[in-house]
Image (cartoon, grey):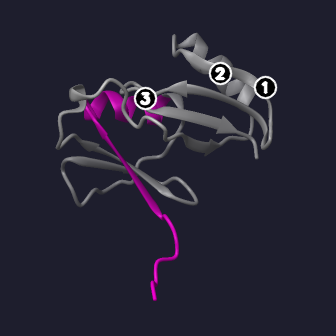
Amino acid sequence: MTNAVGPNFLTLQVRDLERSRRFYADLLGFKQEPVSKNPNAIVFETTPIKLALRRTTIDLDSVSQLGWGVVIWVHAEDPDRLAKDLAEQDITITKPPCDGYCGREFQFRDPDGYELTIYEG
């Protein structure tokens, strides 16, 4: 019998750790944990699951699309406002704000091409 209870930590391997840190901290507003146990990673104090960015240990350029088939869902209080803010920073919105199953939502890609859905839930 298994004792697994479910995901509780998410790590994205990235090409440029500092560029991705700025993207998630400055554009999405994620707060970085003050101390990282790994010098090759940054952990954000996101809830309910923590998000980490890590310098890549694999060749990310050997595939055409990172995370193909995986979409990371991020809760936000005002998806429309965040979509507007991201668009003003020249972030490509891949699915414009709309009413979805979880309320207002939209999709975009981070600097490495990972697909994210922002939703109000």
Query: Which element carries disc 1, helix, strand or loop?
Result: strand
Q: Which residue is mark 2?
A: 95
* Amino acid at circle 1: Cys
* Amino acid at circle 3: Phe
Q: Residue at x 53, y 39 (%)?
A: 71
Query: Which element carries disc 3, helix, strand or loop?
Result: helix
Q: Residue at x 65, y 21 (%)?
A: 95
Q: Residue at x 36, y 35 (%)?
A: 21
Q: Looking at the picture, how far across and down is residue 1, in whole percent? A: 46, 89
Q: CA distance from mark 1 to mark 2?
A: 8 Å
Q: Which residue is mark 1?
A: 98
Q: Looking at the picture, how far across and down is residue 35, in whole percent? A: 30, 57
Q: Which residue is mark 3?
A: 23
| Closest to the observer, 92 or 69 | 69
Q: Residue at x 52, y 53 (%)?
A: 46
Q: Looking at the picture, how far across and down is residue 56, in whole percent? A: 21, 40
Q: CA distance from mark 1 to mark 3?
A: 23 Å
* Viewer-nearest of discs 1 and 3: 1
Q: Looking at the picture, how far across and down is residue 89, in whole percent? A: 52, 13
Tag 1 near tag 2, CB within 8 Å: yes
Per the rendered image, the range of residues in magenta is 1-26
Give the crowd class for mark 1: few <14, some 14-19, many >=20 residues within 10 Å.
Answer: some
Relative horizontal placement of residue 111, taking residue 83 as reference (left or right): left
Mark closer to the chain start, 1 or 3: 3
In the rendered image of this protein, does residue 100 appear above or below residue 1? above
